Structure formats: C-alpha cells, structure tokens
Image (cartoon, rainbow, N blue to C red):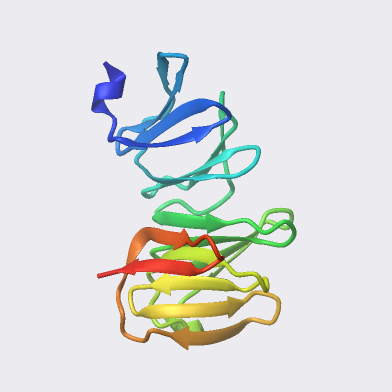
C-alpha cells in the first residue's frame, strides 16, 4: 500500500490526514489514501488555506488539498521551514541562508554569513509577539527585525537542528540543538 511506504509524519489539515516523507505527500480522506507527489518532502507547514511543502532541491509547493502550485523560488535549494507574515515577504529557512521572498514583486534575497548571520544554514524560524523573527542556524540563534534589517545574536556557536522548534503555552520560543 502507498501508506506503508510513507514515513510516519503527518499533519491534520481540514479534517484530512496529510502524510509526507521522502516518497512524497499523500492524503488520507475517510480511510482512502491518495498519493500526490514524487519529490522528496522535507517538511510541511500548515497555513490557513494551504499546506506548504518544503522539498529537497525541488523548490516549494503549495497544496490546497487537491492540487499543487509550485512557487517561483529557486530549485537546488533545500527548504526547511517557512514563516508567512500577514503582510510582507515570506521567510524561508534554507541551506543557502534566510530566504526573503516578496511574492508580488517576485523578488528573492538570501541572507547568510556575509550579511551578519552566524551560519548560512538556517534551520527554523519563529515569530515573536513584537513582530521580529527568531532564526536558528548551525552556529547560533539570530533575532531578525525584518522591517529594519537588524540582527541580534544569541546562543553563539550552538548548533541547532533543522525542523526543531516550538512555542510554549505562555508564548515561549524554543529551538532544538545538538
């Protein structure tokens, strides 16, 4: 069965169980499994109206429950996480740095070590209550103010894990490290 080949990672989205793995993504609707893709899915992030599929080298795809739309982002990049503010650009954690993508203007910018980040491997992104973003990397955590382009370094030389993040019940932010 296709379900047996899937890694046991899933999200519940719009009352469907969506599975993803290195074999792609599929949806279990009332016990009927349907596989949708053949690319390697590293992570799935739930947004209100869509799932964002972050892949190994195949770009980023939107999934509305029935079909895919490939976002106009570079291939050959591994995408690990995404943050989508209500207004403004999308932020992607990648192996090429923090990717800032302005969907309407199709402008893409990668921020890495040459821009003050401690590493160009960005693992995860979490927004805080003040509208800034905490970004974990292979060499520390950065608090990034998107509006002003300001960086604050925290936990220097600590290596963090891709996909490892969480928010506590009182709004605490956490990243998993090695």
Of the pair 110 and 177, the residue shown nearer to us = 177
Q: Quarter-wise, where is residue 133 in the image?
A: bottom right
Of the pair 110 and 29, the residue shown nearer to us = 29
Q: Does residue 47 appear to the left or right of 167 in the view shown?
A: right
Could you tell me which residue is drawn at 36 percent across and 48 percent down?
A: 56
Residue 97 in view in this figure: no
Quadrant of the frame with the N terminus: top left
Quadrant of the frame with the C terminus: bottom left
Q: Quarter-wise, where is residue 86 in the image?
A: bottom right
Position of 148 relative to 98 (above/below): below
Could you tell me which residue is drawn at 47 percent across and 48 percent down?
A: 59
Position of 118 relative to 121 (above/below): below
Of the pair 136 and 24, the residue shown nearer to us = 136
Q: Does residue 172 appear to the left or right of 76 in the view shown?
A: right
Q: Position of residue 18 (x, y in %)?
A: 45, 30
Q: Position of residue 124 (x, y in %)?
A: 44, 63
């Amino acid at each position: 069965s296709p379900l047996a080949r899937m890694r046991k990672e899933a999200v519940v989205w719009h009352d469907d169980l969506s599975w993803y793995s290195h074999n792609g993504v599929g949806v279990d609707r009332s016990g009927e499994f349907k596989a949708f893709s053949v690319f390697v899915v590293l992570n799935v992030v739930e947004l209100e109206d869509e799932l964002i599929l972050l892949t190994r080298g195949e770009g980023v795809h939107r999934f509305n429950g029935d079909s895919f739309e490939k976002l106009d982002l570079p291939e050959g990049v591994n995408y690990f996480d995404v943050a989508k503010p209500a207004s403004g650009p999308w932020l992607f954690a990648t192996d090429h740095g923090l990717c800032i993508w302005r969907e309407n203007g199709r402008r893409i910018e990668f921020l890495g070590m040459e821009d003050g980040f401690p590493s160009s491997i960005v693992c995860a992104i979490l927004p805080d209550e003040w509208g800034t973003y905490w970004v974990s990397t292979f060499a520390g955590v950065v608090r990034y103010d998107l509006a002003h382009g300001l960086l604050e370094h925290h936990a220097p030389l600590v290596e963090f894990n891709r996909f490892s993040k969480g928010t506590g019940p009182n709004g605490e932010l956490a990243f998993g490290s090695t």
